[in-house]
Amino acid sequence: MSEIIRRDPRREWIARNRLHPDNAAVLAALGVNRGGGAVSEWMGPSGVVRKDPRAIGFIGPNGVKRIDRSGLQQGGQATAASTAARDSRRTVTIDQPAFLVAVVPDLTGGRLSGHDKDLLGLARRVADADAEQPGAVVAILFGEYKGEGGGELKEQTLGEAGIDRVVHLDDEFYAGFAPEARLAALSAVEREMTPRFWLLPDSPLGGADLGRRLALRLGERAATGVWQVEADNEASLGWRCTARGAAGSLDIQRPLPRVALALAECAEPVDETRHAAEHLTLAASIPTTLSRIEDLGQVAVDPAGVALAEAGFILSGGNGVKQWDAFHHAAKVLGATEGASRVAVDDGFMARDRQVGATGTWVTARVYMAVGISGAIQHLQGIQRCDKVVAINLDPGCDIIKRADLAVIGDSTQILAALVAMVEQQRGGQRNAA
Amino acid sequence: MQPDLHQKQQQQGIDVAVLVSIGRHPTTGRARRAEQDARGLELALAIEAELPGTRISMLHAGSQDDSSEAALRGYLGMGLKSMTLLEQPEGSDAILALAKHLAATSPQLVITGARAERGEGSGLLPYALAEHLDWPLVNSLASVEKVENGVVTLLQALPRGQRRRLKVRLPAIISVDEAAPVARQSAFGPARRATFAITPTTPEADSELAQWHLSPARKRPKRLKIVKAASARDRFKAAASKSEGKGGQVLTDVSPEQGAEAIYKLLKEEDVLR
């Protein structure tokens, strides 16, 4: 074959004309892949860089040419890029830590709360301050841990929160209100590992109580309500903190002591690295203490008496609820606090103080069950901070379905009746067994 | 025999010490009775009403001057004839003085507020006393149910309006926060007539607190939504897009029973059914 490159003007014309019936075949023959980004730059025969401005960009879904100058590849590859971003966490293993930072998360409902993650972010900051000699974060978990996924994945969620080592204590005597048993365990950890810092959440869920007990047991004057931590060479441990004092009206700047109780949003949670979350067991057995406090368990509280803003389980009714007696009965059987959308309140089915949403109450429930609520934006704002949303609705296209973690499409009256029957049956079974 | 003994115990009542501090009005900054401590005193008065023969002694460690006296009379006006003032200058450590006094008088129940409204306000005092005296401590109390045979049954307030029942052996320390019943109004006349029993103490200066830097609380910066995006396009998308749900499970064309079962499973998983 001769070396002379022969041009075929007709083929080139067809390649340029994307409406031509043979366009695709010609493009394939020329080896140009417009969808995945054609070669738009090449070295010419005389060593000059040649550019094809027409090869830049791609054909959008409407058949219009789009140019993306962000430097990213376009269109169909975006999803691949985002999954790559999700996996882009750097894996960090710290084998020989210079020191330890102990964290005792609340672990409410068996999961790391937002407050816990912020605290772990703070622990990470303190541990990683010196890149030459990084410290390790030890998390002491009490009770069952039920993070997302199981097995390996569970450890992964702990590692992604920034935990290097895990001491998991889920014996049953740590359950409930057992400050003495927990304190004995933490003292054992202190004897064995002697962490440089103890960080606990200053939250009413247990961290505030346990942290103060621990501080006094270790003979430290704890910093409470810490919301800012900065490096400071003059301080004895190398850090200075700002803490809230006097019912939130004072800022106290002091050197960071060994035990600190931090507020929510004290630091950014870890989001770039993945740590090992290696399991440790305590070598010495923890001495069992005779408790002077006996926990008789939680008391049944009338759910209707619980303030809507702090209720943990809300059954909320809207325009789609037709039989309100059945709704009230369901709330009673499930033990849920009742809520309502604005329509239900305006129509007089529920009291005004039960309204959930921007104009009513902003709720923080762990489970929010919306029955016959389509999900107006004001309502969705009100349930922003709920953990799990369950929706029962007839219309599969409404907005609450997009927000819901579990949506059931169907008649709300029948589904609620079936749910009530199921709960009653389970309770009856338990009672017979006992 | 048992009921008689029980009755005797009831008539005897118990010794309750209520620790009070000087509060700070959140807007004017004036001295007042502290909110939580007043609730603690209210709780003690409720125990007295329930258990005749209960003796309430009120304690305050601090200096004596006009503004603090006015604040302390706020407590006395709730129905007490006198109170004990452990006198010590401002900036002294109250824990040692209180611990010494409590060890000497040995009440069976000590009630305090969860945290002070002035000074450090770290809420460490009840814990420090519990550690000093080696007594059990229960925080965040809602109500005292009954006291018998040296054991007190309490209701502890949990977040989300829940309650937990606890049995604690006396002597014990209990701390009170916003979950306890609201304090009654203070009456002016009885407050004027009540007397102070002033006990001098050997003050020990709180040297650590003196080294710290105190300033009026700054507003905390609001956390910004940080978007870590490599390109302008991603940043724009993050700024402009509505937050999409993570894509929950949607059950269509299921019988009511199947739907109810799925919901039941979720409720069980979240542990909200009791």
Image (cartoon, helix red, strand yellow):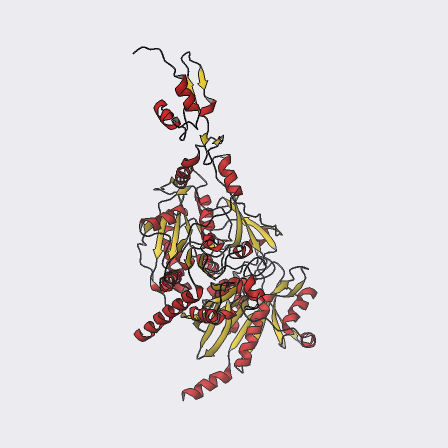
* Quarter the C terminus of chain B occupies: bottom left
In this view, the residue in front, B147 or A202, is A202
> Could you tell me residue A278's position as x and y percent?
33, 48
Classify residue A2 as left or right of residue A311: left
Q: Residue furthest front?
A: A21
Q: Residue drawn at (37%, 24%), measured in percent from left and top? A: A26
Depth check, front residue: A11 or A123? A11
Residue A24 sits above or below residue A219 on the image: above
Q: Position of residue A396 (x, y in %)?
A: 44, 55
Does B44 sit left or right of A165 as displayed? right
Which of the 4 image quarters holds residue B153?
Answer: bottom left
Vertically, is A69 above or below B154?
above
Please, is residue A233 above or below residue B204 in the view?
above
- Asked whether residue B172 is in view, the answer is no
Q: Position of residue A218 (x, y in %)?
A: 44, 56
Quadrant of the rendering where the N terminus of chain B is positioned: bottom left
Across and down, in percent, residue B95 comes to 54, 63
Left or right side of A77 for B212: right
Instruction: Count the labels in the image.
Output: 0
Name the side, left or right, on which A158 lies relative to B157.
left
Q: Nearer the viewer, residue B187 or B267?
A: B267
Q: Is residue A211 visible?
A: yes
